[in-house]
Amino acid sequence: MILPTTFLTAQSRLLVLRHISPASSDRLCRRFAGFANAASTTNNNNEARLLLSGPDASGIVASFSHLLFSRGCGIVDCSSESSESDDQVGTESHRRMFFQRILFDYSNVSVGRNVIEDEINDLCVRFGMKSQLSWGDKRRRIAIFVSKYDHCVWELLLRHRAGELDCDISMIISNHENLRSVADTFNIPYRVFPITKENKLDQEQKQLALMDEHNIDLLVLARYMQILSPSFCNRFQNQIINIHHSFLPAFQGGSPYHQAHERGVKLVGATAHYATTKLDEGAIIEQDIMRVSHRDDVKDLIRKGRTLEKTVLASAVKAHLEDRIISHQNKCIVFSE
C-alpha cells in the first residue's frame, strides 16, 4: 500500500517523497528475512546498515531481503521510499527512484562478510543501484571545527558524553584560541590554525594532513567562520556538515539577525547541510524553525536562533553517524530514527 504524497517544503532542495507504508515494508521484511527469529538473537554489536538507491523496480525489497536471510542474517528494521513520479520521461533526473535502509543482525551469519558484500554488489548491478554497507563495528572519528561561538560545540560534546552520538571526537580545530577551555573540559585535543588571506591554503593543507593522520571520517563545522576552499571540500564529499541560520539568501553578511529584525521577520530557523564547493548550497540534512514577533528584539532573535542551530546540527550529525542519510543529486533522503 502506498501512502498519499508527502511534501517536504522547508526548502526547494529537499526531496518530494512518496512513502511505502511502514506496515507494508514490515510485512515484506518479515516474509523474506525471518524477522521473528532474528528478534530474539539481536545483538547491537552485530548490527549492520545497508543503504540502497537506484531506479525503482519490482523485486528490489524481496531480492535483498532474501539474500540476507539466506546468509543467516535477520532484518531488524527496514525502511523504503520512492521519489514522486514525473510526467517527463527519458532523463535520469525524472526517473522514479527507490531508496532503502536495512538494519540487519549478522550474529548468525553463515558466510564471510566478503561473500555478502559481493552478492550485494551483484544485486546492485542487476538492478542498477548504488549501495553503502556499514558493519557497525568501527566507531566514526570526528573533528569539530569552531571559531568563537561555543553553543554548537557544547551541544555536541554534551550529547556525546551522554552517549547520544556513537563516535569518537578526536579533536577540535579552530582558527582562534577562544574555545580551548571547552576542549579542556572534555579532555579533547585542541589545535589552532590562525588563518589569514595570505596563509589560508597553507593552513588548510596542514589541517588536511592532520585529518589523514587521525583517519577522520566526519568534519563538523560548529559555527566555524571560515569558508573552506573547493579542494578541501572535494576531499571530504558528504563528510562535512555545516550549520547556519535559515535567512539565506535574503539576509547575507555578518549581521543577519539585525537585518531580519529590521524587516520584521516572523520566523527564525537553522539549516544543517553537507558542505560543498558552492557556498551554503549543499544537500540539506535537517532544518527547524521557531516563531518570533515584533516583541522580540535582536537579542531574542539571536538567542532563539542559536537554540535552533545547536539542536539542528546535533540531529544532522546523529543521522549521519547512524547511516540514515542517502544523498541523491543535491538532496538528502533522511530516514527516521
Image (cartoon, rainbow, N blue to C red):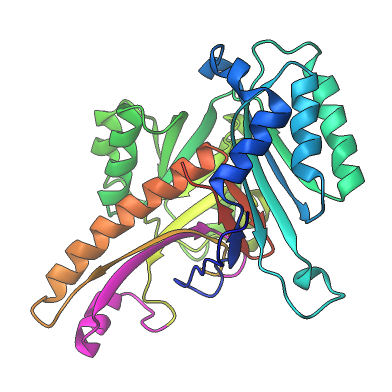
Q: Quadrant of the N terminus?
A: bottom right
The residue lying toward the viewer, choosing from 220 and 106, is 106
- For the point 68% across and 51% down, which residue is it? 99
Residue sitting farthest toward the left: 295
- Residue 262 pos. (x, y %): 20, 88
Does residue 299 lie above or below 235 as drawn? below
Residue sitting farthest toward the bottom: 263
- For the point 39% across and 30% down, which residue is it? 189
The residue lying toward the viewer, choosing from 47 and 71, is 71
Q: Does the magenta-highlighted stretch encompass residue 228?
A: no
The residue lying toward the viewer, choosing from 206 and 20, is 20
The residue lying toward the viewer, choosing from 143 and 195, is 143
Image side of residue 290 versus residue 98, left or right: left
- Residue 185 pos. (x, y %): 24, 30
Q: Does the magenta-highlighted stretch encompass residue 257?
A: yes
Does residue 276 lie above or below 78 as drawn? below
Does residue 114 lie above or below 25 as drawn? above
Inspect this view and state whether residue 136 appears.
yes
Image side of residue 139 versus residue 247, left or right: right
Range of residues picked out in magenta: 250-279
Q: Quadrant of residue 98?
A: bottom right
- Residue 20 pos. (x, y %): 61, 52
Image side of residue 148 versus residue 236, left or right: left
- For the point 85% across and 36% down, which residue is it? 121
Image side of residue 17 versus residue 185, left or right: right
Q: Quadrant of residue 22?
A: top right
Marks counted in the figure total 0
- Residue 324 pos. (x, y %): 55, 43
Inspect this view and state whether residue 255 appears.
no
